[in-house]
């Protein structure tokens, strides 16, 4: 790229940053006038949502433009694992909760933190300083650390803490470590089965991730106990679900469905339906999943939403989504975080079972990440140039999740075109992609 091209690009990015920043500042001021404190997971306006994406993508593109390529590559190559493990240590040692005991302006001395966590003082300081450099924590004066806006979010927040613990668990790091060798192995590179992924190579098992998680683990005293990863995973799913559920509720016209039946296929314990039930009293729900999950779900609903159970608005039933769908003609068949776990052929079977149960007024709502490429898609909003069509780094988490699905299950996050192709193979058509103000969008499918 010539000097003048680089200059043009840098100036354009800075203009984007300036304009988007003004939008963010206006929204902050409006919030302050309304006297409400905004937390990270409330729903932003469309304008604010897009401005955030622009700032995120443009900052990284500016860095790419001005940074030396080798230092950038070196930073990325070291960065992910080091950051992941530092975040893991932060949470595993309980540091955000400990720091919540002191005034943010004062902070806590590293000696006190070392005493409370039993971690060597100098070594702990180095880990915390890496997180300060990444703006996750603050060093308010020499050797004194305090929570900031980001680490404060973790304080006594078990689901959010579980998310960071889960990623730092050996299972995930070992699995990602085996991904390159599995992709380069001619015998394994084309595998699509959920028990022939990097996960099986890493853990030396033939079981799928789900089966492995549900196996009891022998303890040092010889007793068998449930795998602790399962509990952490369920809690982490709650944190991820919470991040996206408000946008799923706000960005699809649920109220217009009236007294409709929603079948949550592979619905887990039914956490999404709980949120919908609280908001839309006319809706009726069926949550379907595997037996151990449904048993857990019955307890959760009895304690959290007993009135909905008594009113007969919720049915929890054991159902394998590869078999005939027994609830015929429901208005909505909802699939959140299901298709991304499975290969195309498996997804076509899941969708075909639903197609066979649908009538003209039924729809399938797929709530998954919808991937955009840097080149763009006619189904999705395109970022302003010179950003790539998918807003660049603002979408990087989607690509990371996509590779996590590949490594764990041979699963995939899909583009609109790939979702349309799946729908067509199952005798369905995509009628609309509802772009939600979160990482997950809703793809609506009808009978074709
Ligand atoms: C990633 S979780 C998503 C759960 C829920 N939809 C949500 O958004 O919280 C995938 C779910 O699929 C369920 N599942 C896996 N295989 C299944 C099958 N063959 N039939 C029904 N449910 C299945 C799992 O038990 C799990 O609850």
Image (tube, rainbow, N blue to C red):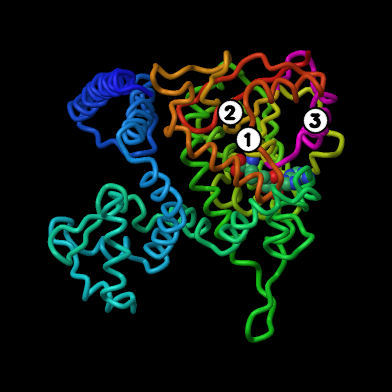
Distance between the alpha carbons at the discs numbered 2 and 1:
7 Å
In-front residue for pair 303/435: 435
Read off the residue under disc 2: 370
Image quarter where the C terminus lies is top right
> Residue 91 location, x and y as percent?
40, 62
Read off the residue under disc 1: 413
Which of label 3 and label 1 is nearer to you?
Answer: 1
Whichever of callouts 3 and 2 sits on the residue coming sooner in the sequence is 3
Whichever of callouts 3 and 1 sits on the residue coming sooner in the sequence is 3
Q: Residue furthest bottom?
A: 221
> Residue 269 location, x and y as percent?
63, 47
Residue located 29% across and 36% down the image: 38
Q: Secondary structure at mark 1?
A: loop
Distance between the alpha carbons at the discs numbered 3 and 1:
15 Å
Whichever of callouts 2 and 1 sits on the residue coming sooner in the sequence is 2
Q: Are marks 2 and 1 in contact (CB under 8 Å)?
A: yes
> Residue 403 location, x and y as percent?
60, 43
Read off the residue under disc 3: 348
Q: Secondary structure at mark 2?
A: loop
**Residue 207 lies in what quarter of the image?**
bottom right
Q: Is residue 166 above or below residue 69?
A: below
Mark 2 lies within 8 Å of ligand 1 (Cβ measured): no
Distance between the alpha carbons at the discs numbered 3 and 2:
17 Å
Tell me where the magenta segment starts and ends, as one range: 341-363
Q: Residues within 10 Å of mark 1 (few under 14, many from 20)?
A: many
Helix, strand or loop: magenta stretch: helix
């Amino acid at each position: 790229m010539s000097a003048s091209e680089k200059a043009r690009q840098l100036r354009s990015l800075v203009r984007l940053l300036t304009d988007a920043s003004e939008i963010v500042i206006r929204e902050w001021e409006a919030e302050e006038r309304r006297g409400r404190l905004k937390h990270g997971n409330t729903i932003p306006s469309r304008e604010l949502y897009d401005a955030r994406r622009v700032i995120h993508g443009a900052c990284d593109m500016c860095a790419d433009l001005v940074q030396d390529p080798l230092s950038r590559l070196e930073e990325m190559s070291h960065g992910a694992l080091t950051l992941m493990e530092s975040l893991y240590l932060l949470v595993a040692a309980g540091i955000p909760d400990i720091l919540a005991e002191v005034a943010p302006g004062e902070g806590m001395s590293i000696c006190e933190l070392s005493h409370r966590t039993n971690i060597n003082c100098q070594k702990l300081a180095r880990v915390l300083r890496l997180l300060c450099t990444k703006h996750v924590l603050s060093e308010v004066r020499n050797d004194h650390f305090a929570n900031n806006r980001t680490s404060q979010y973790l304080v006594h927040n078990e689901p959010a803490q579980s998310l960071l613990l889960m990623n730092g668990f050996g299972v995930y790091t070992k699995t990602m470590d085996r991904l390159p060798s599995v992709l380069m192995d001619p015998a394994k590179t084309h595998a699509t089965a959920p028990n022939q992924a990097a996960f099986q190579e890493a853990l030396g098992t033939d079981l799928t991730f789900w089966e492995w998680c549900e196996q009891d683990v022998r303890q040092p005293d010889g007793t068998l106990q449930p795998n602790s990863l399962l509990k952490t995973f369920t809690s982490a799913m709650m944190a991820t679900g919470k991040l996206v559920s408000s946008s799923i509720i706000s960005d699809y016209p649920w109220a217009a469905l009236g007294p409709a039946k929603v079948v949550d296929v592979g619905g887990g314990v039914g956490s999404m339906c709980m949120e919908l039930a609280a908001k839309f009293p006319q809706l009726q729900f069926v949550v379907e999943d595997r037996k151990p999950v449904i048993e857990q779900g019955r307890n959760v609903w009895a304690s959290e939403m007993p009135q909905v159970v008594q009113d007969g608005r919720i049915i929890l039933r054991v159902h394998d989504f590869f078999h005939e769908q027994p609830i015929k003609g429901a208005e909505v068949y909802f699939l959140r975080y299901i298709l991304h776990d499975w290969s195309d052929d498996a997804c076509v079977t899941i969708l075909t079972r639903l197609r066979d149960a649908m009538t003209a007024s039924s729809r399938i709502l797929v709530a998954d990440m919808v991937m955009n490429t840097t080149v763009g898609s006619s189904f999705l909003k395109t970022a302003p140039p010179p950003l790539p069509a998918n807003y660049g780094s603002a979408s990087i988490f989607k690509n990371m999740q996509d590779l996590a699905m590949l490594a764990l299950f041979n699963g995939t996050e899909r583009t609109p075109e790939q979702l349309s192709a799946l729908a067509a193979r199952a005798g369905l058509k995509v009628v609309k992609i509802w772009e939600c103000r979160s990482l997950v969008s809703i793809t609506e499918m009808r009978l074709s």
